[in-house]
Image (cartoon, grey):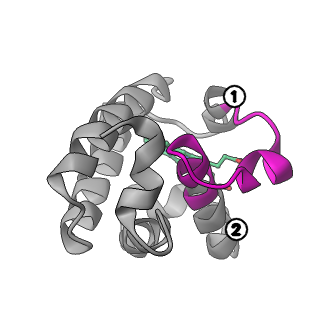
Amino acid sequence: LGEAEVFDALGPGGFGPLVAAFYRRVRADDLLGPMYPPGEWAQAEWRLRAFLDQRFGGPMAYSERRGHPRLRMRHAPFAIGEPERDRWLALMAAAMEEVAVSDAVTEVVAPFFLMVAEGMRNR
Ligand code: HEM
């Protein structure tokens, strides 16, 4: 599966259901939950979902609203070390299992999540 085909392969809603399952876990997580700005869960969920939709062949709504992603800069205010990186990846893996992401899609997005999560590490 090509990167630009992932959005369609996910079916209706693209990354919406996956990101919803992911954030349900993040909100309840003892390590990651407190890192997020309180009262902005809906916005945070929209940002990750729109970013992933756009990155993998869906609509360009993220850039229209947020400009260049500059993910490393935007994660700089948060202390991200190995524990935070590994928790993010574990919660995403659980969310992928919950919404039953296909093997074909997993093959494309899992290495991307690994690479970006390592890139966000600033501790
Ligand atoms: C934003 C934490 C990894 C994509 C954020 C925010 C936090 C955070 C606290 C701010 C919430 C908001 O206002 O949107 C973390 C931690 C990570 C991690 C602890 C562990 C390594 C990742 C990865 C991706 C990602 C792997 C992409 C695959 C994003 C995006 C935003 C964001 C797109 C919104 C950027 C914006 O437009 O402001 N993250 N993140 N993050 N994160 Fe992460």
Q: CA distance from mark 1 to mark 2?
A: 18 Å
On whether residue 101 falls in the magenta region, the answer is no
Image quadrant in which you'd find residue 71: top right
Image check: 40 left or right of 21? right
| Residue of label 2 | 43
Q: Is residue 123 visible?
A: no
User: 115 above or below 67?
Assistant: above
Magenta-highlighted residues = 49-70
Q: Residue at position x 22%, y 73% from top? A: 98
Residue closest to the eye, 111 or 83: 111
Q: Residue at position x 50%, y 29% from top? A: 120
Whether the residue carrying mark 2 lies under 8 Å from ligand 1 is answered with: yes
On whether residue 61 falls in the magenta region, the answer is yes
Q: Residues within 10 Å of mark 1 (few under 14, many from 20)?
A: few
Residue 66 at what x, y percent from top left? 80, 47
Residue 45 at what x, y percent from top left? 58, 66
| Residue of label 1 | 73
Q: Residue at position x 65%, y 57% from top? A: 47
Name the secondary structure under disc 1.
helix
User: 35 above or below 118?
Assistant: below
